[in-house]
Amino acid sequence: MTNKRWFQIGVAILLTLLIIFLFMKVQSILSPLVIIGQTIFMPLLIGGVLFYLTRPLLKWLESIKFPRWASILSVFVVIGLVGWGFYGLVGPPLTKQVNALVESTPEIISEVQQFSKFLTEDQERFPEFLQKTITEVSGRVDTIAVGAGSLLIKFIQNVFQGVFLFVLVPFFLVYMLKDHEKFAPFIASFFKGDKKTWIRKTLADIDDVLRSYIQGQLFVSFLVGVMLFIGYYAIGLRYALLLGVFGMMMNVIPFLGPYIALVPALVIAFIQEPKMAIYVAIIMLVSQQIESNLITPNVMGKSLDIHPLTVITIILAAGNIAGLWGIILGVPTYAVIKAILKNIYAHRVEIKEAATESV
């Protein structure tokens, strides 16, 4: 019976649940480790993203006979020049628009409240099914508007406070660039024979998945942000640069990101001029069509090979489990787990075929 597939799967599930149960019981003992993990999580994440973005440059510099230390120094020089150029070109107008938006937040909230009042007073003009919807939503508009205003101000404050965390990022990035080839051999050194080969291949596949996702997703998001800024600026929308940058940041979230980025753009457009909201919706629609049909297939291809329905399910589940970070990290985490499971399955097939041939 122990050789049956269903028995092995059942034992694996029970052991997994037992490990989770024991971990929850000793959670208080491990709380210092949790605090340390939370402290280094953000710098480590940013360092990892920069590592995958700059590794092609590092490899190219080493291919033209640059020593490792000179290549790493050159990478930091390039990062500094790009950051300085971005700040010089985008920083002042972006800061100006952020300050203007913060100052206009009470006015925006007031406009939303007046619009809600208009819908409530004149809802008899609308069909019955819309009247019920308006009644339900209007009771929440004030709370949502005030909450959105405070959330926006808090978000901006956290962004500026988060700059201090970037002090740790260069240290993580230096060691990642310097010793990244040693990670896989170190992990594989604990195994022997076929298991060692399997570990090396699995780690290589995980590396390919993360590289493809990070490089492709950030490049695609940058292009989408540029398209949104050009479109918003062309129609004369207020805070065009800020909304373009926000759209670029939200596009990192698969599938749902563009819809999240559309909401503030529609609100600001409607307050500025109602018909401009239609132009904003058209700009977002065109940019998403270009991104999904032209940019993403050529940049990322089928490297992840994840069905859109699976992406939606992952985002919803990960968002309920871990909030915003779950939404952002859910898809790459799933892709890594999928790569591991594919290698496990392939390894089992190889063992089964070898056993069959020997018999």
Image: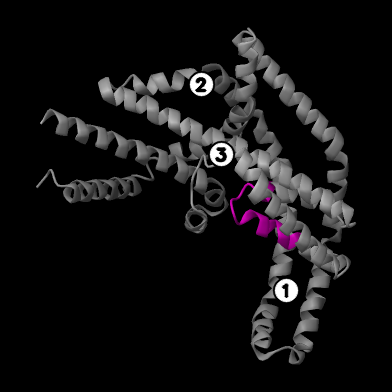
Q: Residue at x 67, y 46 (%)?
A: 294
Q: As drawn, is 158 to the left or to the right of 191?
A: right
C-alpha gap between disc 3 and disc 1: 39 Å
Label for residue 90?
Answer: none
Q: Name the amino acid, label 1.
A: Asp
Q: Which residues are magenta?
A: 249-265
Residue neighbourhood size for the residue with mark 3, other residues' Cα within 10 Å, grouped as few (<14), some (14–19), many (≥20)? many
Per the image, label 3 sits on a secondary structure element best described as helix
As drawn, 57 above or below 142: above
Look at mark 3 in the image and give the residue it sits on: 213
Task: Name the chief secondary structure element in magenta.
Answer: helix
C-alpha gap between disc 1 and disc 2: 51 Å
Q: In terms of depth relative to the viewer, which is nearer, 312 or 68?
A: 312
Sequence-first disc among 1 and 2? 1
Q: Residue at x 48, y 48 (%)?
A: 306
Image coords of residue 181 (percent x, y): 48, 18
Image coords of residue 72 (percent x, y): 64, 16
- Residue most extreme to the right: 236
Image coords of residue 354 (percent x, y): 19, 30
Sequence-first disc among 3 and 2? 2
